[in-house]
Image (tube, rainbow, N blue to C red):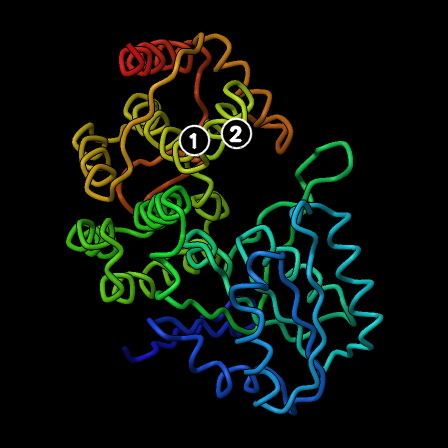
Amino acid sequence: MTIKRQLLNINQKSIDVRMGAGALDELPRMVASAVGMPKRALVVAATAEHEAYGEVVSRSLIDAGFAVEEYVLAADAQPATFACLQQVLERCAAAELTADDELVGIGDAAMCSVVAAAAQLWCGGTACVLIPTTLDGMVTLATEMQPLALADGSDLVTLAPRPSMVVCDFDLVRAMDEDTRRLGRTLMLGAAFAEGKRVWSSLEELASRLASDDAVALAEIMAPVQQARRNVIKAANPSARHALAYGCATAQALATCLGDAVPAWALRAEGMRFEARLAVEAADLDPEVVFDQDDLFEDLGVSEYGFALDAQTLVAAIKCEHARRSNRFLLPLPKNVGQIRLTAVPDDVLLRHAQAYVASRAELVA
């Protein structure tokens, strides 16, 4: 398959996204373009990803003219932490990396987010190549990093990622576990909802093929999804720039209430389902759009997730999670496809919809 190239221009930075089946085979000719002249490169990966892809990546860098060092995290390491970020920065120092060298991250969204943050901080900005090994990472890492947690568990440390290059090899998708593939498709739907009818229609046409991990379908949809996410970040309207957080407040609240056993795709998809229904009353969303979203989720292989939860507990958790990030209770709710805006939600409306929602999810469990 031909490797596609999508340039995302964000705040005077051009992010080069390369995507297609067999992209890793083309690494030797790609990685050198991120720097003026290849000299040093530090490869950072977790143990499993290093065993699977570390040799291929390191050989590609050597073939491109780099002197390569590697930093492999322990198998039980938690990459999405500030402590891990410090460790990566210390390895940059040990490797004597400069602003003209290259930092390469291999792994899931958490691992690559740490590398992206380290690259921004080291020498005021060092070239960075990310190789995501999960579908959600392929969707998000050019435009969004996973927040890093502090020692007390607060996961609010984040930067706008500015990698030099993101390499998405769709041959890796079939080897991913189903949970990460479903999360990736859920995030595609969120980007399509934020952008408008063009990407939404494309996703509808390709949904069944995406659910079966068709590499050609992935290649067709990934570039529009990346453009959609870029457009949200660059939106002139400050309210519109929150569109990618659609469903997040409820997803975070459900995670707090239900614990770690619920997969991330289910949390995010259920957050979007609930907030779409809330938007019918709070933001005048056409109910038909809610049904369209439900149908698209099903076509993408993202089914409804049942659980038992008290409505008032859910409302309290939504407000608590939102208050950690903002002093104003405004949720990014859709008014239409392509129009997600911060919206005030009265307490009685929030509780009434929460009651109906948790009742429907309890029926799924029963």
Question: Relative to the observer, which residue lies in front, 344 or 181?
Answer: 181
Name which residue lies at 46% across and 36% down: 264
Name which residue lies at 69% across and 67% down: 119
Name which residue lies at 36% across and 44% down: 178
Q: Position of residue 203 (x, y in %)?
A: 22, 52
Question: Relative to the observer, which residue lies in front, 258 or 196?
Answer: 258
Quadrant in the picture for the C terminus: top left
Quadrant in the picture for the N terminus: bottom left
Residue type at mark 2 is Gln
In contact (CB < 8 Å): disc 1 and disc 2: yes
From the image, tell me which residue sits under label 2.
252
Q: Is residue 185 above or below residue 254?
A: below
Q: Dot 2: what SS? A: helix
Residue type at mark 1 is Leu
Extreme-front residue of the structure: 51
From the image, tell me which residue sits under label 1.
267
Q: Dot 1: what SS? A: helix
Snapshot quadrant of residue 63: bottom right
Snapshot quadrant of residue 263: top left
Residue 73 in the figure: left or right of residue 57: right
Q: Is residue 163 above or below residue 156?
A: below
Residue 305 in the figure: left or right of residue 247: left
> Callout 1 environment at 10 Å: few (<14), some (14 to 19), or many (20+)?
many
Q: State the mark number for residue 313.
A: none
> Callout 2 environment at 10 Å: few (<14), some (14 to 19), or many (20+)?
many
Snapshot quadrant of residue 218: bottom left
Q: Position of residue 325 (x, y in %)?
A: 62, 33
